């Protein structure tokens, strides 16, 4: 494979999403809390950065209200859904009529160390304090130090693959 990309080899946005969709990922809702209330979004990229110190990173569209809430609140929580919570993926992914804080009418929410909303019964929750925000194009990569963790014993993760939840 050539190390040099030419204009002819660049792919369009639709093709890019098809390629990225080939990886299976845990379906996660990233949440934050600030003075304007809770906000959250379905994350297509929420993963570990390093173990020492324990750090996570998420990518978020800077136009989503959740981004500014994350920055203002200084924290975020990654909520890995269980199959029983599959109905939350659509609304937090922007499907349906619920927007912003209204999405939190769905499910039962509590908090851990940072005050970010965490979903009760999630397969796993990782609660983070923001360390750094890197902005590229219309996206921000938000890096957070893990402050707390919770998991539901024996819960399986809800997995997304090729745009579908499994």
Image (cartoon, rainbow, N blue to C red):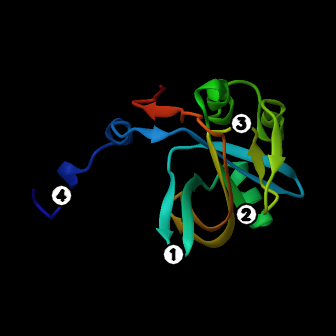
Q: Does the rendering let one see residue 89? A: yes
Measured Cα–Cα span from mark 4 to mark 1: 38 Å
In which image quadrant can residue 20 be found?
top left
Q: Secondary structure at mark 3?
A: loop
Estimate the spatial distance between the alpha carbons at disc 1 and disc 3, rounded to whole Å: 27 Å
Q: Residue at x 61, y 36 (%)?
A: 81
Please tell me how crowded label 1 is: few (under 14), some (14-19), or many (20+) other residues with Cα within 10 Å. Answer: few
Name the residue beneath numbered marker 3.
Answer: 121
| Crowding at mark 2 (Cα within 10 Å: few <14, some 14-19, many 20+) | many
* Label pair 4/1, CB-CB below 8 angstroms: no
Above or below residue 87? Residue 67 is: below
Among all residues in the image, which is located at the extreme front? 153
Crowdedness of circle 3 by 10 Å Cα count: few (<14), some, many (20+)?
many
* Vertical side of 98 occupied by 44: above or below: below
Location of mark 2 (residue) = 75
Tell us which disc is closer to us: 3 or 4. 3
Ranked by sequence position, the earlier of labels 3 and 2 is 2
SS for tag 2? strand
For the residue pair 127 and 132, the one nearer the viewer reads as 127
Pointer 1 residue: 52
- Give the left or right position of residue 97, taking residue 149 as reference: right
- Calculate the distance from the C-alpha at mark 3 to the C-alpha at mark 2: 21 Å
- Mark 4 or mark 2, whichever is nearer to me: 2
Which circle's residue, 4 or 1, is located before the other in the chain?
Answer: 4
Q: Secondary structure at mark 4?
A: loop
Q: Is residue 79 visible?
A: no
Disc 1 element: loop
Q: Please provide percent x and percent y for residue 113.
A: 79, 62
x and y percentages locating residue 150 in the rendered image: 68, 51
């Amino acid at each position: 494979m050539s190390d040099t990309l030419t204009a002819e080899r660049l792919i369009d946005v639709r093709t890019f999403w098809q390629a990225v969709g080939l990886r299976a990922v845990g379906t996660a809702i990233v949440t934050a809390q600030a003075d304007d209330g809770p906000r959250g979004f379905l994350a297509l990229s929420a993963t570990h950065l390093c173990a020492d110190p324990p750090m996570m990173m998420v990518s978020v569209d800077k136009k989503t209200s959740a981004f500014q809430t994350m920055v203002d609140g200084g924290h975020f929580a990654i909520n890995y859904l269980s199959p029983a919570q599959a109905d939350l993926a659509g609304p937090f992914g922007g499907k349906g009529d619920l927007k912003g804080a209204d999405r939190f009418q769905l499910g039962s929410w509590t908090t851990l160390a940072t005050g970010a909303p965490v979903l009760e019964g999630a397969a796993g929750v990782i609660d983070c304090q923001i360390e750094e925000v890197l902005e590229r194009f219309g996206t921000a990569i938000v890096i957070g130090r893990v402050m707390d963790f919770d998991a539901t014993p024996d819960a399986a993760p809800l997995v997304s693959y090729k745009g579908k939840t499994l």
